[in-house]
Amino acid sequence: MIYGQLVIGPPGSGKTAYCEAMYRELCKLGRRTAIVNLDPANEDLPYKPNVDISHLITVADVMENIKLGPNGGLIYCMEFLEKKIDWLLDELGKFADCYLLFDCPGQVELYTHHQSIQKIVSRLNKSGYMLSAVHLVDSHYCCDPAKFMAVLLTSLSTMLHLEMPHINVLSKIDLLRQHGKLHFNLDFYTDVLDLGQLVDLLSDDPFLVKYKKLNEALNELIENYSLVSFHLLNVKDDRSIRKVLKAADMANGYVFGVNEENRDIKNMLSCAMNADFEYARISDIAEKYLSRDTKSSQGYASHGR
Ligand SMILES: Nc1nc2c(ncn2[C@@H]2O[C@H](COP(=O)(O)OP(=O)(O)OP(=O)(O)O)[C@@H](O)[C@H]2O)c(=O)[nH]1
Ligand SMILES: [Mg+2]
């Protein structure tokens, strides 16, 4: 079995920075790791990729030779990669003893309805690759209820479309306080348990009140699936990186594999039981990155607005 993470998410959500920071953390842990750049538009990478799609195809070449725009060019590249999957498997074969980090492109439709990434993942899965999707979304969307609702829908459709182990992550949490006050406490956004309050908040807006029924239906859809929740990330904070790693390792099964780090039975049991208290999961981050006002004045989700 070869384990790894497929790092996905909208443009600029922090995928490349995450791969670089996660690579450094994994090296510290002594885990042999390889980075696979699957973004044919990636230039000036902050890491040296071990496998690089740009050796096969780049968006710039496609734009020049086939006269497509940047979005169409990217889709073309991913369809090309799907056809050339044996090239990818051969390249990955050189790193068979490594944990893999796949740095993916930032085009949302690749994860919500286009087929290529899904087919590539499914082929990798059949070839023994155990990957978890790490879906990064910029945490500034938490500051706007309508945008947060859109994030929930995108996260849910990505989970359903890719059909693979999946964790969602709110990135750049260290910048959150710069975007103003949150309407709810942080656990409201991470746990996604009480969306009725989000609908109420949206209905307070005179422009959005006419969409109340639509928002209620979307809310019901998200709650009925009960799949979406979020981890928090600041790529510059090792502790935060390790928490996301733990969640990704649980999702892809690395913690249950016969790996040098997992021979400790206590560690395995604590992962299996998800022994972190939920409060501990976000409390240190709330303490560190949110102002006192944001933490308390607007009330916990369970206490209303
Ligand atoms: N402060 C802060 N900045 C971050 C964090 N994560 C990423 N960034 C910054 O956000 C910007 C975009 O990050 P990238 O890693 O290039 O994002 P990306 O998702 O790979 O972008 P595309 O490949 O264009 O889709 C960069 O300037 C990063 O340094 C974070 O946790 N905190
Ligand atoms: Mg990138």
Image (cartoon, grey):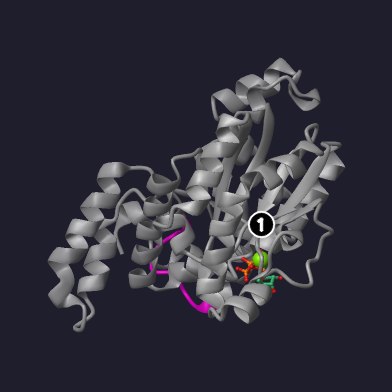
The residue under label 1 is which amino acid type? Answer: Leu
Query: Would residue 209 be found to the left or right of residue 104 on screen?
Result: left
Q: Position of residue 103 (x, y in %)?
A: 67, 56
Name the outermost residue toward the bottom. 207
Bounds of the magenta segment: 179-186
Is 175 placed above or below 192 here?
below
Q: Is residue 47 above or below residue 101?
A: below
Q: Is residue 171 left or right of residue 93?
A: left
**Residue 122, percent from left and from top:** 52, 39
Classified by dominant secondary structure, the portion drawn in magenta counts as loop
**Residue at figure coordinates x 65%, y 62% from the top left:** 39
Expressed as whole percent of the image width and height from the top left, the position of residue 173 reads 59, 64
The x, y position of residue 270, in whole percent, is 62, 24
The residue located at (76%, 60%) in the rendering is: 55
- Packing grade of label 1 (10 A; few <14, some 14-19, many >=20) is many
Q: Which residue is mark 1?
A: 38
Q: Quadrant of residue 259?
A: top right
Q: Where on the image, by quarter, is ligand 2?
A: bottom right
